[in-house]
Amino acid sequence: MDRYEIVRLVESARKRGDMPALYQADLQGIDLSGLDLRRVYLCHVNFAGANLQGTNLSWANLREANLKNANLSQANLNGANLFRASFGGANLTEADLRRANLRGAQLNQANLQGANLRGANLFRANLNQCVLIEATMIGVNPSGADFSRANLTNAVIIREQLSIAGNLSQTIMPDGTIHD
């Protein structure tokens, strides 16, 4: 499946009033940058290494999708369902993740510098070694989340919110101190 086929499938489904769906598609390495994929059903899709820069994925269902090493910089993931999605090594710089469901997501070694995570659900998410420099994290649910060795320098988050995180070992805190 290529970019043109995906655009055609999404537009066709929308014209019929249906929810576009690409369940379990293998889209590894594909360039879908800048596309409008809002409210598309993308559960279990393999986006490993894909270019999704600036793509509108707001309110899309990406449950258990593979986004390892994908480029999602400046992508709109507002309200997206990212339950148990894998983002290891992904580029999410300046991504809009407001109200996203990242429950159980694997974000280890992902770059979320400048990302907006306001109101996101990070319950039991793995953010080990994540770059969260200058990320906005007001109102997130970090309960049980693993922030070990993450960099939260200048991140906007209420310190009390971090107190319910599961693991802050060796985390660089917003004020630059290292949590022990």
Image: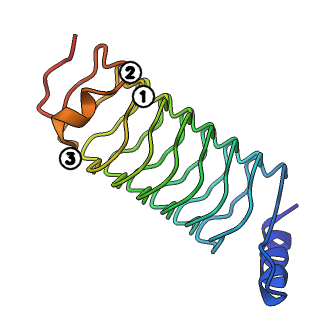
Q: CA distance from mark 1 to mark 3?
A: 17 Å
* Quarter the C terminus occupies: top left
Return the residue nearer the eye: 31 or 62.
62
Residue holding disc 1 = 145
- Disc assigned to residue 166: 2
- Image side of residue 49 versus residue 137, left or right: right
Residue holding disc 3 = 156
* Colouring chosen for the image of the structure: rainbow
Which quadrant of the figure has residue 165? top left
Label 1 packing within 10 angstroms: few (<14), some (14-19), many (20+): many
Classify 124 as above or below 96: above
Give yes or no for contact between labels 1 and 2 (Cβ–Cβ under 8 Å).
yes
Return the residue nearer the eye: 90 or 96.
96
For the question of whether residue 152 can be seen, the reply is no
- Image side of residue 92 versus residue 153, left or right: right
For the question of whether residue 63 can be seen, the reply is yes
- Image side of residue 30 versus residue 96, left or right: right
Residue 24: x %, y % from top left: 84, 49
Residue 69: x %, y % from top left: 60, 39
